[in-house]
Amino acid sequence: MTLARSIRRLIITVCCAAFVVTGCEFDGVNSLPLPGTVGRGEHADVYRVQIRNVGSLEPNSPVLIGDVVVGSIGKMKVTNWTADIEVSVRPDVVVPANAVATVGQTSLLGSMHLALDPPLGQAPSGELEPGSTIGVDRSSTYPSTEQTLSSLSVVLNGGGLGQMGDIVREFNAALNGREGQIRDLLVRLNDFVGMLDTQRDDITASIAAMNRMSGTFASERDVISGALQRIPPALDVLVKERPRITEALDRLGRFSDTATGLIDDTQDDLVRNLANLEPTLRALADVGPDLGTVLAYAPTFPYTQSFIDRAIRGDYMNQFIIFDFTIPRLKRGLFLGTRWGQEGAPMVPAPGDPWYLTYTLDPLKAPITATPTEVAGLPPLVEAGQQQADSQLAVDHASGPAPGPVPEAPAATTGAVGAGGAEGN
């Protein structure tokens, strides 16, 4: 009875021990929070980091922000071939919102750490809320010591590092004895680089212009392709016409020689003709201020614009004009003073007109006194009584000068050959 009871107790004890052993897991001392670790406790902030390769990172490894230990690694597990790490940080530490997780090596002995720093070249911004997760896209792992030494071994053994000595020796032999030239080259190179630096804006503008030109060419690609396809036939035509083109160029050369000889032979005459044109051009320059008035009067002939503005009180007006183009009328009027004018017709110059203007038959523009036919001589000596009579005669002439001869105004002829009438609106 006592033996059976002892066996039952033993079986119950073994079952309890097996239950306890199979229900608990122990991964070593490092799986437990070690004394002195930073960032542990009830008030610590917990974050999660997902990373593909943790290397030799273990629980209780330090967590760094700005090379300062602010926490430690908690539990680690694997989810879908990705490490899920629990990070415990002191509650008074601010983790930047733009922080990225990086697994690095603290020392060459193999100690690893997890750094929570902003990306290189960026300032910390914001604050990462506790319980947040840093995903795989914001985590990475630095190369380990084994990977670094392996890469260095490849460079030293098969990377051509042994040829560096030959390169250094050849470079030294090339520079030996040419120190002054090398120094001058460096000075010129410095000046060249400085000039490029001062022209930086122009170079940038040129590159931008080339970019715009390339864009224009790209947009006109079809047109350029069509032009390139049409150019070969045009070149074939030019090749076929090469003899004619050559002959034309030869004849052009002979023509140039002939023209050069002609210009050399007629140089004096050409200069003389240009000198003779000077009075004509000067006269044209003198009447230049009046050309504007004439051009303004031409569209409204025979009336001026001011007369039309005052006379026409509507949109249009009717007028009847007779143009007398008979030969006698033209000889006495328009052609007077030319080789086609009426011979012997009197022409009275208007007073005050410049020398280059034509004469007029208008009696209102005739001179006050007639033009003397001959030059007067010296007055004869007279007595006192005769001198007083001459003075009285001069006073009479000054008070009322005799008018000059008035030419006969030609009458308009409407029934002769060449006359015409027109009625316009």
Image: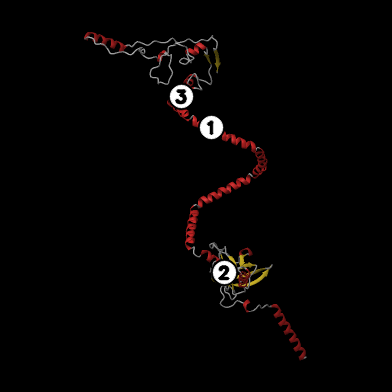
Q: Residues within 10 Å of mark 2 (few under 14, many from 20)?
A: few
Disc number lying in front (1 or 3)? 1
Task: Find residue 396 and report its horizontal and vertical position in percent.
Answer: 29, 10
Whole-percent x, y for residue 319 in the image: 53, 15
Q: Is residue 77 left or right of residue 404?
A: right
Q: Which dot, 1 or 2, sits closer to the camera?
A: 1
Secondary-structure class at tag 1: helix
Q: Dividing the image into 4 quarters, which one contains the C terminus?
A: top right
Badge 1 amino acid: Ala
First-in-chain label (1 vs 2): 2
Tell me the kind of residue under disc 3.
Thr
Q: Are marks 1 and 2 in contact (CB under 8 Å)?
A: no
What residue sits right under mark 3 in the picture?
293
- Per the image, the residue denoted by label 1 is 259
Residue 43 seen in render: no
What's the mark number on residue 306? none
Q: Is residue 201 above or below residue 385?
A: below
Disc 3, disc 2: CB below 8 Å? no
Task: Name the residue nearer the viewer: 266 or 35.
Answer: 266
Name the spot of residue 289 as percent of width and height, x first. 43, 26
Q: Given this view, does label 3 or label 2 mark the residue nearer the observer?
A: 2
User: Disc 1 and disc 3: Cα gap in Å?
Assistant: 43 Å
Please provide percent x and percent y for residue 250.
59, 36
Q: Which mark is residue 165?
A: 2
